[in-house]
Image: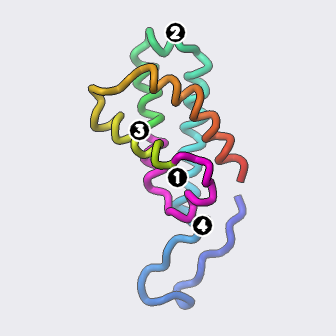
Amino acid sequence: MWCPSAPSKSATSESEPKPSPCDPVDEERLLDIRDACDELAGFVALGRDQFDSDRAIALAVERLLEIIGEAANALDDTTREQFSGVPWRDRTRLRIVLAHHYHRIDADQVWTIASDEVPFLAVALRSR
């Protein structure tokens, strides 16, 4: 993926420069999100019955959604703005629920997000 050069240290103030829209760390987080989307597609392809009957698959789906949320949370605002159609806040809030309010996880909601919303996210990230 092409990225313009970040400003050199000499061209900025003495403080740390803000990451460019193509900051390498953000590019890694975007790649993490795309990879998680691809892995989720594999689990979704197994079908809802497999998701419901195999706890390991359900946990894997939840974990991949957590990864998406954590990586999304780490993105700089400038990078998020490049994908204005992506509901970043929803992704980061879902991670909080999955990680900290695990007793409130709704399997129907997790499946809907994995099967309906994640493919949209994958397409949006690849459109750049």
To which residue does mark 3 refer?
94
Amino acid type shown at disc 2: Asp
Q: Which residues are magenta?
A: 66-87
- Real-space CA distance between mark 1 and mark 2, rounded to the nearest whole angstrom: 31 Å
Local packing at callout 3 (Cα closer than 10 Å; few below 14, some 14-19, many 20+) is: many
Amino acid type shown at disc 4: Pro
Q: Earlier in the sequence, mark 1 or mark 2?
A: 1
Instruction: Answer above or below: position of 31 versus 5.
Output: above
Q: Earlier in the sequence, mark 4 or mark 3?
A: 4
Q: Main secondary structure of the magenta part?
A: helix
Q: Nearer the viewer, residue 79 or 45?
A: 79
The answer to whether the residue labelled 4 contacts the one labelled 3, judged by CB atoms less than 8 Å apart, is no
Local packing at callout 4 (Cα closer than 10 Å; few below 14, some 14-19, many 20+) is: some
Quarter assignment of residue 44: top right
- Real-space CA distance between mark 1 and mark 4, rounded to the nearest whole angstrom: 12 Å
To which residue does mark 4 refer?
21
